C-alpha cells in the first residue's frame, strides 16, 4: 500500500475498503454506496482504478495498491491535489478521494487529456454536490502543469 509492503492475514469475505479503513487505518477512501456504483472508494491497483468496496482484499495480494494517502510526497500535495484545492473542486469532500484516484490513473496513462477524456475517465465517480465542472477544470489544470 502506497509504496510500503504490508503483510496482514485477511478473511476471505473482507473487501479492500474494509482492509484499508478498518485494519490499516487508511481512511481517505470513503464508503459511499458500498455497491460499486458511486466511486468514492476508488483506489489504484497496479495503476488501474477499482472500486475497493467491490474488490476482495485477497485479490490485492501481491498487487501495488495506491490510496489517496499515497499521492502526497514528503508532506507536499501532488500537482493534482493542489489543482483540486485551487479550483475548489472538493465541495463536501466525500467523493474527492475517488475523483483524485481516477484522475491520477488518467494522467498517468494520458498526461494531456482532452476535456472529453477527463469527463469519460471520471464518469464512474459521482459527486453529490454536482461540482463536476470544477473537478474537470482542476484535472485539466494539473495536466497543463505536468507531474500530476
Image (cartoon, helix red, strand yellow):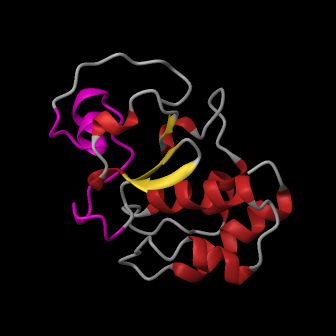
The answer to whether residue 148 is left or right of residue 39 is right
> Which of 137/1 is in front?
1
Question: What's drawn in magenta, residue-wise?
Answer: 12-38
Q: Residue at x 39, y 45 (%)?
A: 28
Against 124, is 4 above or below? Answer: above
Query: Is residue 36 on the magenta stretch?
Result: yes
The answer to whether residue 124 is left or right of residue 56 is right
Q: Residue at x 52, y 31 (%)?
A: 2
Q: Position of residue 37 (x, y in %)?
A: 31, 71
> Which of 28/39 is in front?
39
The tally of labels here is 0
Q: Residue at x 84, y 64 (%)?
A: 144
Q: Main secondary structure of the magenta part?
A: loop
The answer to whether residue 25 is left or right of residue 125 is left
Query: Is residue 57 on the magenta stretch?
Result: no
The quadrant where residue 73 appears: top right
Against 55, is 89 above or below? Answer: below
Against 6, is 23 above or below? Answer: below
Q: Position of residue 85 (x, y in %)?
A: 61, 59
Against 148, is 122 above or below? Answer: below
Q: Position of residue 12 (x, y in %)?
A: 17, 34
Q: Position of residue 132 (x, y in %)?
A: 53, 80
The quadrant where residue 16 appears: top left
Q: Residue at x 29, y 34 (%)?
A: 58
Amino acid at each position: 500500500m502506497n509504496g510500503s509492503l504490508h503483510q496482514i492475514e485477511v478473511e476471505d469475505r473482507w473487501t479492500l475498503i474494509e482492509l484499508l479503513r478498518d485494519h490499516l487505518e487508511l481512511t481517505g477512501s470513503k464508503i459511499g454506496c458500498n455497491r460499486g456504483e458511486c466511486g468514492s472508494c476508488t483506489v489504484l491497483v497496479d495503476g488501474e482504478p477499482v472500486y475497493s468496496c467491490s474488490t476482495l482484499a485477497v485479490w490485492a495480494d501481491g498487487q501495488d495498491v495506491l490510496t489517496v494517502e499515497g499521492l502526497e510526497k514528503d508532506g507536499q500535495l501532488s500537482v493534482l491535489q493542489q489543482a483540486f484545492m485551487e479550483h475548489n473542486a472538493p465541495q463536501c469532500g466525500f467523493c474527492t478521494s475517488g475523483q483524485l484516484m481516477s484522475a491520477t490513473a488518467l494522467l498517468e496513462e494520458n498526461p494531456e487529456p482532452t476535456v472529453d477524456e477527463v469527463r469519460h475517465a471520471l464518469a464512474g465517480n459521482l459527486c453529490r454536490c454536482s461540482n463536476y465542472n470544477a473537478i474537470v477544470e482542476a484535472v485539466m489544470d494539473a495536466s497543463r502543469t505536468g507531474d500530476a
